[in-house]
Structures are given as C-alpha cells and as structure tokens.
C-alpha cells in the first residue's frame, strides 16, 4: 500500500464513503427517514461499521489500476480465487451483525421475533468478528497477490 498512487487512495476513500452509506442507511446507524430501527444499536456496532467500510474501501482500491490504463500482458493467475467469496462473505456477515435483529426480514422469517432477540442478537458480535476476519483475509490476499505480480518496469537486457 505504500506504493499506491493517488488514484488508488482516491478509490479507497470513495469506496469507504460508499460502504459507510450502503451499510449505515439501512441499519440506521446513519439516522434517516427511509428506515426505522426498533432496537437501539449496541455500542460495538459503530466501530464494526467503520472498520467494515474501511476494509471495503481498501479492497476496492486493490482492484483499481495504478495508472488507469489497461494491464498489458499481466496475468491474474497468482490471485487467490477465493478472495471475492471472502469479500462477499465478510460484507454480508458484518451487515447482519450491525443490523437490527428484529428489523431483518430473513431473521424474522427464520426465527420469529423471540428467536431474533434470544438467539440471533447474542450471535451478532460473533458475526461481526467473523465478517471483519473474512474482509481482512481478503485484503491480505489481494495485497500479497499484487506484491507478487508486480511487473518489472526495466527493459529486458
């Protein structure tokens, strides 16, 4: 990341801001009139929300080309193919973790209101840790692949 260009850092900042909005509005961590949260957010949901957004922004930046042009002759053979799955799993787990347990239709259909409060709500911190771990592993894999695949810019002798 020390060698990232302004373009990549801009992508990271915009991705972080987008993730903050995308996660914060439906979970009502950002107060809005579109959604209602029936149960007040726990103290830990705010740091998880911000950490998730930062990791998502950094992941987006790893997919941004430094120069903006097309990659010539580059191959993605060294990239870990499970990275997109980890990213998606991490994002979904943290979304379930920061959301209101009784506002989530999927949880209500599966467990009912009492199950959402007695079973799902206590599991939400575990989902948050697992989601952040998936995102961190995905970012690590992307950064390692970028370091290994870095093309030599010097002409061949």
Image (tube, grey):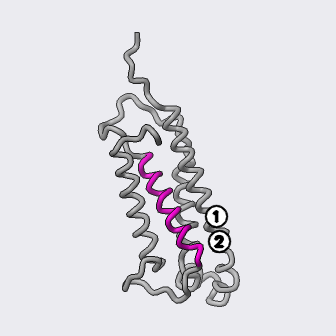
Where residue 30 sits in the image (x, y, percent)? 42, 77
The answer to if 92 sits in the magenta stretch is no
The answer to whether mark 1 and mark 2 are in CB contact below 8 A is yes
Residue 113, quarter of picture: bottom right
Dot 1 lies on which element?
Answer: helix
Q: Nearer the viewer, residue 151 or 50?
A: 50
Where residue 103 sits in the image (x, y, percent)? 53, 84
Q: Nearer the viewer, residue 109 or 148?
A: 148
Residue 32, quarter of picture: bottom left
Residue sticking out furthest to the top:
157
Question: Within 10 angstroms of label 2, few (less than 14), some, or many (20 or more) residues?
Answer: some
Chief secondary structure of the magenta portion: helix
Which residue is drawn at the image coordinates 47% and 62% (left, top)? 53
Which residue is drawn at the image coordinates 52% and 39% (left, top)? 79
Please state, as top left, top right, bottom left or bottom right, where the C terminus lies in the image: top left
Q: As displayed, is residue 129 above or below residue 82?
A: below
Which residue is drawn at the image coordinates 47% and 36% (left, top)? 76
Dot 2 lies on which element?
Answer: helix
Left or right, 73 with reference to 86: left
Residue sticking out furthest to the left:
69
Left or right, 131 with reference to 77: right
Residue 69, quarter of picture: top left
The answer to if 48 sits in the magenta stretch is yes
The residue to which callout 1 is attached is 129
Question: Within 10 angstroms of label 1, few (less than 14), some, or many (20 or more) residues?
Answer: some
Q: Which of 88 and 121 is in front in this view?
A: 121
Disc 1/disc 2 C-alpha distance (Å): 6 Å
Q: What span is colored magenta in the figure?
A: 43-62
Where residue 50 sits in the image (x, y, percent)? 49, 65
The residue to which callout 2 is attached is 125
């Amino acid at each position: 990341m020390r060698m990232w260009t302004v373009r990549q850092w801009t992508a990271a900042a915009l991705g972080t801001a987008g993730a903050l909005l995308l996660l914060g509005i439906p979970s009502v961590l950002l107060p809005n009139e579109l959604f209602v949260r029936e149960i007040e957010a726990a103290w830990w949901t705010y740091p998880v929300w911000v950490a998730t957004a930062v990791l998502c922004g950094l992941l987006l930046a790893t997919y941004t080309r430094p120069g903006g042009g097309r990659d010539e002759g580059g191959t993605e053979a060294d990239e870990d193919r499970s990275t997109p799955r980890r990213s998606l799993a991490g994002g979904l787990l943290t979304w379930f973790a920061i959301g209101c347990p009784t506002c989530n239709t999927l949880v209500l259909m599966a467990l009912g209101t009492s199950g959402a409060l007695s079973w799902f709500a206590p599991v939400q911190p575990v989902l948050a840790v697992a989601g952040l771990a998936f995102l961190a592993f995905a970012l690590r894999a992307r950064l390692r692949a970028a370091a290994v695949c870095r093309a030599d810019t010097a002409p061949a002798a």
